[in-house]
Image (cartoon, rainbow, N blue to C red):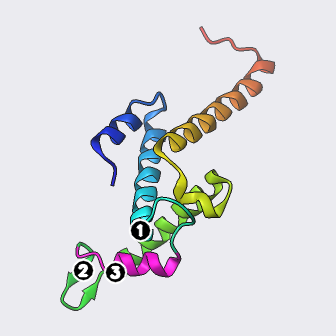
Amino acid sequence: MLSPTELAELDGSLLPALERHHLRLLAHGLRTLQQIAGRRQGPPPSHEAIEAWILAQPQIATDSAGADTAFAAAFATQLGAAARQLEGMAQAPDRALNLSLEDLIAWAQREADARVAKIETIRAPLGDHTP
C-alpha cells in the first residue's frame, strides 16, 4: 500500500485533481500487484494469481459460504486493467512491476503536457481571444 509520504508526493504534483486521483488508483494498483507477486520487479502476476489473492482476502469474504464473487471478479478485472496500463508505461511487460512512484508521476505529467500541446495546436489557428 502507499505510505503517507507517497500519497503526499502524489498530491503535491501540479496535475489536475482528476489526474491525481487516477494516478493514486494506478499507484495503489501497482503496489497491490507487487504484493500479489511478492516482488517489485518483473511482469505482473497472472490473472489466476490475482484471483486467488483476491479470494484469500478476509475483507472480501461475505459469510461462511465464501466470497462476494461479483466484487472479486470486478476487482480482478480492474487489477488486470492496471497491469496492462503499467505494462504499456514500462514499454515492456516483463518490467511492469519495476515502475516507481516517480515513474508514474513523470508519465502522468507527460500525458498531461501532450494533451495541452494538442489543445494549443488546435487553438493557435483560431486565434486565442481569451482575456
Residue at the limit of the structure toward the right, as seen here: 125
Q: Gap between marks 3 and 1, in whole Å?
A: 17 Å
Amino acid type, residue under disc 1 in the picture? Gly
Residue extending farthest top = 131
Q: Which residue is mark 3?
A: 55
Which image quadrant is residue 37 in?
bottom left
Q: Nearer the viewer, mark 3 or mark 1?
A: 1
Query: Looking at the image, is 31 positioned above or below residue 44?
Result: above
Q: Are marks 1 and 2 in contact (CB under 8 Å)?
A: no
Circle 1 residue: 38
State the extent of the magenta-drawn residues as a range: 46-58
Q: Give me the residue at 39% from left, 65% from top.
A: 35
Q: Give the amino acid type for the residue marked by disc 2 in the picture.
A: Ala
Q: Residue at x 68, y 34 (%)?
A: 114
The Cα–Cα distance between marks 1 and 2, rounded to whole angstroms, is 22 Å
Residue bearing the label numbered 2: 61
The main secondary structure of the magenta stretch is helix
